[in-house]
């Protein structure tokens, strides 16, 4: 078991807080299809190339790792930015806990947990074998990361590993809403769902190429995955797949759709499924009938989209692009009413995870 050490790596909330620079939508470069959502805000972090980005589960905050060693922490509603200065190695990836208390950080060969309240950082591991993919459970009590040959679940309160399961080149991880299972996506295109206690692998399904993003439906009955599969490179495999999952270990492919470029992020808000790709295309589908997803919105710009996420009520959709542009889309009145109920079950909370890092 890895030793956990508490340190103060951040001199940090000696923060720089500055308003984000606004920019206007370039209508000559952008293309929109459908009216279920409307672009209402566009703002940009100046002179930044985004390595990775994470949209919090309530859609209120963003954490962004850039080409510099700093982490940008952004309040979407207030349009304010905090610059978190990391004093040692470059930061490659981040994620925010659902209660916004913790920030998961991958830098060099280490995975860290920063506590915003205590302003201290816990070293979860300092012997990482490969690029980390991270996520939190819905109650913010568990933290998971995947690496070269395993996926690890860490109990934040007890400060110890509770699961260390062998796997291969993990590229995406996500907890089920009940914390009983964790979904993983691999470099080789395999999506596996494994029990945390007792540890055990449940039958999987495959894409043909790398998995970049995974999310569960709120009721835990469906898993959605986004991959490098495209219409051009792998015409026999869908870019985004929707699969039904049950506790008996049965996984049935229900439906899906394609992108022209590699999918970087997927997220669910009840019956709405959003996905984005490195070609700059953002799509939203109504999946009330998951076997026949219906496209209701599409927005395309020239810069690749790194991360997307719905607001807690599903009335807004936020995207982050590689050039540091942040866009906020507002659902129209009809879309707000239709978003309630995922596959016949009424709920108004979404579950989404994105753990994609730009290719080097």
Image (cartoon, rainbow, N blue to C red):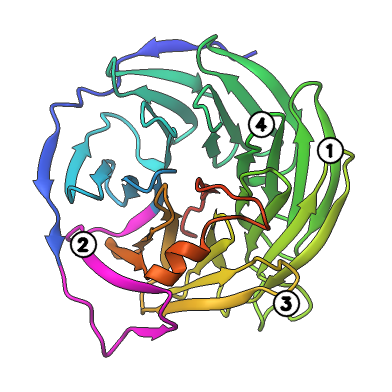
Mark earlier in primary sequence (4, 2) = 2
Is residue 47 within the magenta segment? yes
Q: Looking at the rendering, in which quadrant would you find the N terminus?
A: top right
Dot 1: few (<14), some (14–19), or many (≥20) neighbours within 10 Å? few
The residue lying toward the viewer, choosing from 56 and 330, is: 330
Give the number of the mark in front: 4 or 2: 4
Is residue 202 within the magenta segment? no
Distance from disc 3 to disc 2, alpha carbons, whole Å, reads 34 Å
Residue drawn at (25%, 50%), measured in percent from left and top? 76
Element marked by disc 3:
loop
Mark earlier in primary sequence (3, 4) = 4
Distance from disc 3 to disc 4, alpha carbons, whole Å, reads 34 Å
The residue where tag 4 is placed is: 178
* Residue 247 - label: 1
Dot 2: few (<14), some (14–19), or many (≥20) neighbours within 10 Å? some
| Percent position of residue 307, x then y | 43, 57
The residue where tag 2 is placed is: 44
Mark earlier in primary sequence (3, 2) = 2
Element marked by disc 1:
loop
Give the number of the mark in front: 3 or 1: 1
Residue drawn at (35%, 34%), measured in percent from left and top? 89
The residue lying toward the viewer, choosing from 235 and 258, is: 258
Mark earlier in primary sequence (1, 4) = 4
Q: Quadrant of residue 294?
A: bottom right
Element marked by disc 4:
loop
The residue lying toward the viewer, choosing from 225 and 65, is: 225
Mark earlier in primary sequence (3, 1) = 3
Q: State which region is magenta.
A: 23-51
């Amino acid at each position: 078991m890895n030793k956990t050490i508490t340190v103060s790596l951040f001199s940090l909330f000696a923060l720089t807080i500055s308003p984000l620079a606004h920019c206007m939508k370039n209508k000559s470069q952008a293309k929109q299809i459908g009216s279920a959502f409307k672009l209402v805000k566009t703002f940009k972090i100046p002179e930044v190339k985004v390595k990775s980005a994470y949209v919090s589960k309530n859609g209120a905050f963003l954490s962004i790792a850039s080409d510099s060693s700093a982490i940008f922490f952004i309040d979407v509603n207030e349009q304010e930015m905090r610059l978190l200065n990391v004093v040692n190695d470059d930061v490659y990836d981040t994620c925010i806990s659902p209660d916004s208390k913790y920030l998961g950080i991958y830098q060099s060969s280490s995975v860290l947990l920063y506590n915003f309240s205590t302003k201290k950082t816990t070293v979860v591991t300092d012997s990482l074998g490969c690029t980390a993919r991270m996520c939190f459970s819905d109650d913010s009590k568990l933290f998971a990361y995947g690496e070269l040959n395993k996926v690890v679940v860490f109990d934040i309160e007890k400060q110890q590993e509770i699961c260390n399961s062998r796997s291969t080149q993990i590229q995406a991880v996500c907890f089920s809403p009940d914390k009983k299972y964790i979904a993983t996506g691999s470099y080789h295109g395999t999506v596996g769902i494994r029990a945390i206690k007792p540890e055990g692998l449940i039958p999987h399904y495959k894409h043909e190429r790398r998995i970049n993003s995974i999310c569960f439906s709120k009721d835990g009955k469906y898993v959605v995955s986004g991959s490098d599969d495209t219409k051009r490179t792998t015409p026999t495999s869908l870019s985004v797949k929707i699969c039904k999952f049950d506790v008996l270990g049965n996984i049935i492919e229900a439906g899906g759709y394609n992108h022209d470029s590699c999918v970087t992020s997927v997220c669910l808000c009840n019956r709405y499924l959003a996905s984005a790709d490195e070609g700059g295309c953002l799509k939203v589908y109504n999946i009330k009938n998951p076997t026949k997803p219906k496209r209701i919105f599409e927005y395309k710009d020239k810069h690749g989209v790194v991360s997307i996420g719905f607001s807690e009520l599903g009335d807004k959709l936020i995207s982050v692009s590689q050039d540091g542009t942040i866009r906020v889309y507002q659902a129209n009145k009809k879309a707000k009413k239709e978003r309630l109920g995922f596959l016949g079950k009424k709920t108004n909370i979404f579950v989404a995870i994105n753990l994609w890092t730009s290719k080097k």
